[in-house]
Amino acid sequence: MRNLITRRLVGGAVAFAAAAAATIGFAGLAAAAPVGNLGTLTVNKQSGLDIDAPSYTTSAGCSPDSDGYNLYVYGPGGFANGLVGTTVTDVGFSTSGPISLVQTLSFKDIAVDNSTTIVPGTYTIAVNCVDQFSTEVKGTFTKDIVFTSATQWNVPAQTSPTTTALSASPAAPVTEGTAVTLTATVSPASATGSVQFRDGANALGAPVTVANGVATLTTSALPQGNRSLTAEFVGTGTSGSSTSAAVAYQVNAPAAVATTTALAVTPSGTAAQYSTVTFSATVTPANAAGVVQFFNGANALGNGVPVSGGSATFTSATLPVGTHSFTARFSPANTAAFEPSASAAVALEITAFAGVSSHQDISTTVLAGELTISVANQNVILPSPVMAADGSLLTTSGALNPIKVTDTRAGNPGWNVSGQVTDFINGANAINGANLGWSPKIVDKSPVQNITAGAVVNPANAIVPGATAPAGFGLASARVLATAASLGGNGTANLAADLALNVPTSTVAGTYTARLTLTAI
């Protein structure tokens, strides 16, 4: 009976203390459970019932400025502000070693005496070292228990502390794109869980399961710059979590890739004046972006040519007579990605032309459904071809601009003017040059001249590109425009010719241009 009376008296004191706490806490604000700043408590058993009043052992002695202790229970609901489980006492008190003490009231008694109930949740047992005279708390030991129901509790399993260390290989600095292996070493090696590698706040890949204390990740995705790498170990079971110290890791921009440039000149060795010379540059590696500038000695040939698929091409028909030395120089679009390069010099001799040469550019615009020819200045414009009556081909006609031939040579040897045309070109499409024919004529001449107009050359019957015209058809081969007899060429003559062009009906719409070269010998 005395024990019961004691419990009730203590219960009354608890009720008074709780009321006072509510008044001081202003409008019943819940007090946070204290932190065990002096250490922890060990419970005499790992699970129990609400009717238990467990015993505890502190992890050390109380602070020297205290002379007693009490015990409070903090938790959800009515336990939020802390309820007394043991009033202030000095039984077993010590400042030099652990204290063994008993919770005077059971959990159920504490709840009943304070007109509350136990609800599932985490409860903190707090043993406070106090000055019994002033009741000031000098330090606290704590332990969490968990009520899984209103009547059953247990002590949560303790997690074992771990440490995590991070290393990176190869050693910094590295070039962007290098495969870097990150190795996390977790101690103790028996720890279970996974490691999330990070670059700053950014996750690198998915978490990696730890095996025998080690987790590794290889990545080539580290961007250039000074990286801050960490390894976060998340433990499972009784393994605690830990994070490595940050590892500074320098990733440099990739070095510029060396390039080579090779030059081919066609034709090689020698070429006649006014003939077309093709310059072909090959840049390696083929993905190098930039332009190639072709040079004749120190002089640039035209504008820079963009590189496409490792190649750049330039043509010229205006190289002067003489020996030339050509080079091709590659300038990268991004000097941080590729280095410039220059080809070896390629020699070419331009020989004097064997006669007098002239040319007229002939253009035709093939429209959808008809052909239109347009040229400017000295160019010849043929009308757009139209469908023949039988539907077998398209036809158009026109005339050459007058050609003036003046001969003032001593000896009056006479002369011959001939013409030859290339294929009509529109990008990858063409009209066979043999489809162009002419009817030569003499516009006027000096009275003393003895000139004969060349024979009529009929156009081929709209043959396809690459086909050979029948003998005598078309201007794809050199044809005579006019001939001056010996002793009958001195003076000035104006020549012309009517043109006729047959076009296959399969010709794709567009503007087609051919070059007619006229040679006086």
Image (cartoon, helix red, strand yellow):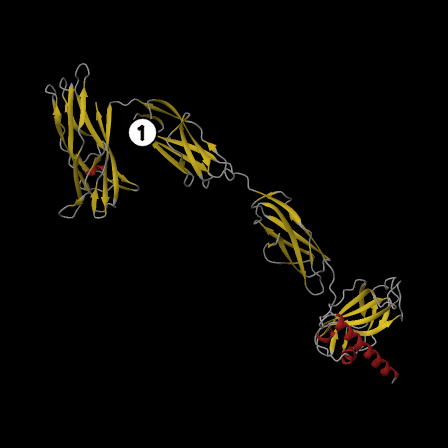
| Residue 395: quadrant of the picture | top left
498 above or below 88?
Answer: above
- Relative to 376, 194 lies left or right: right
- Residue 423 in view: no
In percent of width and height, residue 429 lies at 28, 42
Q: Nearer the viewer, residue 517 or 197?
A: 197
Q: Residue at x 65, y 48 (%)?
A: 168
- Residue 333 in view: yes
Amino acid, disc 1: Ala
Q: Residue at x 84, y 73 (%)?
A: 87
436 above or below 123?
Answer: above
- Relative to 254, 503 lies left or right: left
The quadrant of the image that shows the N terminus is bottom right
- Relative to 341, 507 lies left or right: left
- Relative to 37, 217 lies left or right: left
| Residue 311: quadrant of the picture | top left
In percent of width and height, residue 99 lies at 86, 67
Q: Residue furthest bottom?
A: 1
* Crowding at mark 1 (Cα within 10 Å: few <14, some 14-19, many 20+): few
Total labels drawn: 1
Q: Residue furthest left?
A: 447
- Write down the residue under mark 1: 317
In percent of width and height, residue 230 lies at 65, 52
Q: Nearer the viewer, residue 38 or 187?
A: 38
Q: Residue furthest top?
A: 410
In percent of width and height, residue 114 lies at 77, 78
Describe the element under mark 1 as helix, strand or loop. loop
The quadrant of the image that shows the C terminus is top left
